[in-house]
Amino acid sequence: MASSAATVRRLGHSFEEPIGSRLDKLHQIRVRDLATRFAFGFAVSVFAGLVTLAAGNRVGGLFLAFPAILPASLTLIDKREGRQAAATDVSGAVLGAVALISFALVSWQLSGRAPLGIAQGAAAAAWIATAGLLYFATSAVVRRRHRGS
Amino acid sequence: MSDIATLAVKGCLGGLFVVIFAALSEPLQPKSFAGLFAASPSIALAALVVTGITKGTDADHEQSLAMVFGAIAMVCYCLTAVVAVERFGALRGSIVAFGSWGGVAAAGYFAFLAH
């Protein structure tokens, strides 16, 4: 129980930190890590395609939101930065996953009605907007709660 | 385009999008913000673009509807993984969380999509 409370506190702190970027980290990306991610992306895309061919669009569509990339990313983060960093990464992925629902809803509404590029561009824009809004809203709530306590 | 060629293009495009989103997230801080990209629509974008070109946008329409339920299952997966990764480590924890994705995706399919 105490460790759960500590986890929630630590995750909350992560949402309070200011957003920034360390471009020097781009130089630290190893080709092997990128190759691992490419291989996972390739495998999951082919798998989702095979499921669609075998079982149809409705089963295959489910697998467009299959979380197979996460284990690869989390394992790489765990190796380099530790278990807690991996758990914090997933807490951000929760919001990204909620935004994935908005991507699917926009794509569902526009596919067949708008040109392909516009439908998928709008769906991607919906993901970015929803993910960003959710992150800033969560961040604001966590900050307000900490100021109040 | 043959099915094998289509699968190969989907695979390459999916892999490429995953690498692009990973590279975009790498320099970002804090970790929770970078984590947003771990649930980016990389596989979906690749699949829907290739399907739209090869089979038409009606197939995209049907797959996107199903993806809504897959994405709801993904939210459940991530919520489970937050706890499981902390407890069991990244690899075992993220594998344990697959159970919640499978359960919610199957429930969504049988409740809304199967008929």
Image (tube, rainbow, N blue to C red):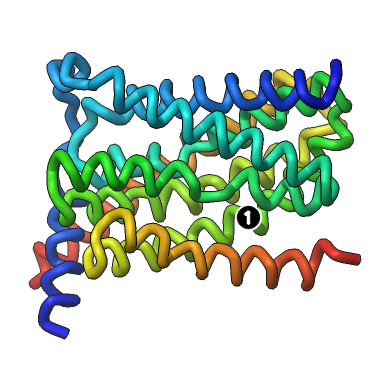
Residue B101: percent from the left, percent from the top? 54, 63
A64 vs A68, left or right, is right
**Could you tell me which residue is drawn at 64 percent across and 63 percent down?**
B105
Question: Local crowd at mark 1 within 10 Å, few (<14), some, or many (≥20)?
Answer: many
Seen in the image, is A74 located left or right of residue A63? left
Q: Position of residue B52 (x, y in %)?
A: 80, 25
Is label 1 in a helix, a strand or a loop?
A: helix
Which residue in the structure is indicated by mark 1?
A: B70
Q: Is residue A125 visible?
A: no
Residue A14 horizontal/vertical position (percent): 17, 51
Residue depicted at 75% across the width and 64% down the height: B109
Residue at the location (42% across, 24% down)? B19
| Circle 1 chain | B
Image-quadrant location for residue B88: bottom left
The quadrant holding residue A110 is: top right
Which quarter of the figure is the C terminus of chain B placed in? bottom right
Instruction: Please tell me which residue lies in front, B66 or B85.
Output: B85
Q: Amino acid at mark 1?
A: Gly
Q: Quadrant of the N terminus of chain B?
A: top right
A18 relative to A58, above or below: above
Residue sitting at 31 percent across and 30 percent down? B25
Q: Is residue A63 above or below residue B4?
A: below
- Residue A144 position, x and y percent, is 18, 61
**Would residue A67 be visible to someone looking at this image?**
yes
Farthest-out residue, bottom: A1
